[in-house]
Image: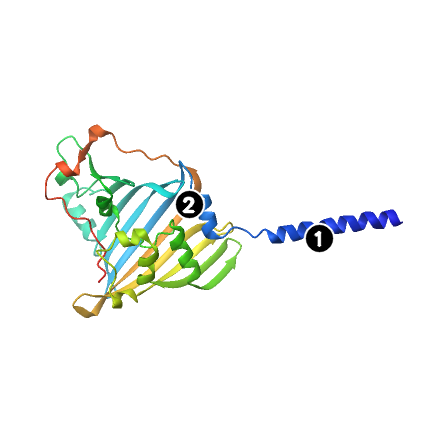
Amino acid sequence: MRRWMAALAAVLAGSVLSTGVAEAQAPPSPVQRLKQQFGEHVGLRISDLGRVYQDGKPAVTIWRKGRVEFDAAGVYGTDTVGRTELGKGVVRELENQLGQRLGSTRVICFPDEAYLSGPGYETWLPEGKTWLGLIGPANIKQTAALPQIVNIFEPATLGTLLSHTTSRKKGSYGTVLQGAVTLRTLYRVSPSFRDRLAGPPSARSGRIPIGFRLWLDRTGLARRLTTTWKQPLPGRPRSHTTTVADTRYTGWGSPVTLTPPPPEDTADAGRVGADFPEPAVLPIG
């Protein structure tokens, strides 16, 4: 009897000890889970849908999808295909008049070089070339277009969203976080956002909130991010634009190895003429 009770006590003690150890090992935070994804030749797929409304009317719609490749420090490269629609049906109307599709723009981007192909770049391409190459970090800004201005691949930016969360809803799929962060705060923590501006936002613009909803799966990885922000038009205080972006993240941990286009198909932007536009910046005052 005593032996049986001793064995039972040992089992219960081991069970309590195991439970205590499990409780002590908290699951990794979303920022830690993001950093765990950083490694050579792995990444994920992304898809974006962004809309800009002026006084409630659609002004610009942007679609983008593609792949992201990480290295040990974060994002190493991206390969995306995008399409922009002006107004409501303007591009489609033009395609109907021409009797052909204008196609989409493809951008392959690395830390110090980027390659662009598609409508709008043929002007600078000599005969036989299909890609325009941009060399140098300053030129990479040319590839940073809407729709999504919040970069959750930056650990500090993701952490800022988490710290500004005001609502959490859990479900069988994971957790939905909701909150807002100001343009000033985003400018302070996000290098990619700073690269997209001509300078820091003004005191007035800096207070503009960016509302967000972030979907996390049960492991803490981002599955979807929506952002919304509104600002007045310069010189027209009664008019405003509202930007809404919806980004999906799938296939975390997939093998991804991005490569530049063949050199024989590429023209150096620095040698094809002096009229190449300056890198675009977001119109935030």
203 up-or-down from 122: above or below: below
Q: How many labels does the image show?
A: 2
* Residue at figure coordinates x 46%, y 58% from the top left: 176
Asked if residue 146 can be seen in this view, the reply is: no
**Amino acid on which the number 1 mark rests in the picture:** Val
User: Can see residue 184?
Assistant: yes
Q: Which of 130 and 112 is in front in this view?
A: 112
SS of the residue at dot 1?
helix
Which residue in the rendered view is the most extreme toward the right? 1
Within 10 angstroms of label 1, few (less than 14), some, or many (20 or more) residues? few
Residue highlighted by disc 2? 250
Q: Residue 47: give x, y in percent of width and height.
A: 35, 47
Which dot, 2 or 1, sits closer to the camera? 1
Q: Nearer the viewer, residue 169 or 158?
A: 158
Task: Judge from the rendering whether residue 93 lies leftward or rightward of residue 45; answer left or right.
Answer: left
Left or right of 217? Residue 245 is left
Q: Which mark is residue 16?
A: 1
- Dot 2 lies on which element? strand
Horizontal placement of 97 versus 47: left or right?
left
Compute the Cα span from label 2 to label 1: 38 Å
In the rendered image, the quadrant that contains the C terminus is bottom left
Give coordinates of residue 127: x percent, y percent: 13, 31
Residue at (26, 32) in percent of width and height:
261
Give the residue type that dot 2 points to.
Answer: Thr
Q: Which residue lies furthest to the left in this view?
A: 274
Residue drawn at 33 percent across, 54 percent down: 190
